[in-house]
Image (spheres, rainbow, N blue to C red):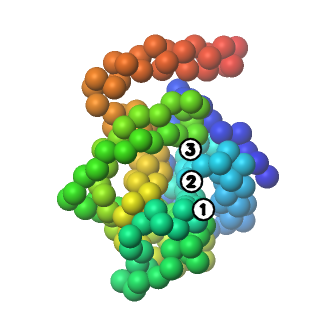
Amino acid sequence: MVLKVVLYPAPVLRAKCRPVTTVTDKIRTLAADMLETMRDERGVGLAAPQVGEDVQVAVIDVSHNPQCVSYFKINGEDKNMVEHMPIVFLNPKIEGGKAKVSEEEGCLSFPDLRGQIRRSEDMKVTYETLEGETVTIESDGLLARAFQHEIDHLNGILFIDRMSPAAKVGLKRKLKRYMEEWADEKE
C-alpha cells in the first residue's frame, strides 16, 4: 500500500527513532509499504519517520543506476549490487570514510527542494534484516549517500541540517513556506 509521505516540519521527522526489538508482521508490512511508497514517489530511499513511524526501519533501492557505485561488499565479499536491491534495513550503525564529497541531494519530505550536501564518499553500515540476520555493507557513491541520508532520518537529522550556512540563508523563504503550508494542513 502506498503511504502518505510526511512533509517538513512534521515533528516525527525530528524524532530519534526507537530500535526494532522484534520483527513483527506490522514491521514487515511497514517495510513492504515503504518500498511501494518509495517507488511510487520515484525515490532511492525512504525512512520510517517519513511515513509517520518513529522506528529504525528504512529502505533503499539504487538498482536503476548500477554504475552509481565503484564497489559493493556484503560481509567483506565483493557482490553484484543490483542483485541485492532493494535493501530493507533495521537498527543501522554506520561508519563514514574520511574522504568527503559534496553532491546535490533531495528528500521526499521536502518536495522541490535540493541542495549541495557534503557527506563521506564511502561508508560501512551494519544492520539487521527482516529475517534477523546481521549484515555489513561497504560501498561508495549514490548507495553510500543514500544510506547516510536515511540513517540521518532515523536519528532526527534532516538534509537541510547538513547544508552550509549560506545555503540555509538562501532557503529561509522556502522553509518558511513549508511551515505555513504544514500549519494550514493541521487546521
Looking at the rendered structure, the number of numbered marks drawn on it comes to 3
Amino acid type of the residue that numbered disc 2 sits on in the rendered structure: Val
Q: Which residue is mark 2?
A: 44
The foreground one among 79 and 10 is: 79
Q: Residue at x 60, y 62 (%)?
A: 64
Above or below, comparing residue 77 to residue 14 in the picture: below
Q: Identify the mark at residue 64; answer none if there is no mark.
A: 1
Mark 2 or mark 1, whichever is nearer to me:
1
Question: Is 147 on the left or on the right of 60, as rendered?
Answer: left
Q: Quadrant of residue 41?
A: top right
Above or below, comparing residue 7 to residue 104 in the picture: above
Q: Residue at x 46, y 62 (%)?
A: 68
**Residue 29 in picture, x, y percent from top left:** 72, 60
Label located before the other in sequence (1 or 3):
3
Label located before the other in sequence (2 or 1):
2
Residue reaching furthest bottom? 77
Q: Quadrant of residue 143?
A: bottom left
Above or below, comparing residue 184 to residue 7 in the picture: above
The foreground one among 116 and 59 is: 116
The foreground one among 70 and 34 is: 70
Mark 3 or mark 2, whichever is nearer to me:
2
How far is disc 1 from disc 3 in space, using C-alphas?
Answer: 24 Å
Quadrant location of the C terminus in the rendered image: top right
Determine if residue 65 is in view: yes
**Residue 26 in picture, x, y percent from top left:** 71, 59
Question: Is 138 on the left or on the right of 28, as rendered?
Answer: left
How far is disc 3 from disc 2 in space, using C-alphas?
Answer: 16 Å
Label located before the other in sequence (3 or 2):
2
Mark 1 or mark 3, whichever is nearer to me:
1
Q: Are marks 2 and 1 in contact (CB under 8 Å)?
A: yes
Q: Which residue is mark 3?
A: 49
Q: Residues within 10 Å of mark 2 (few under 14, many from 20)?
A: many
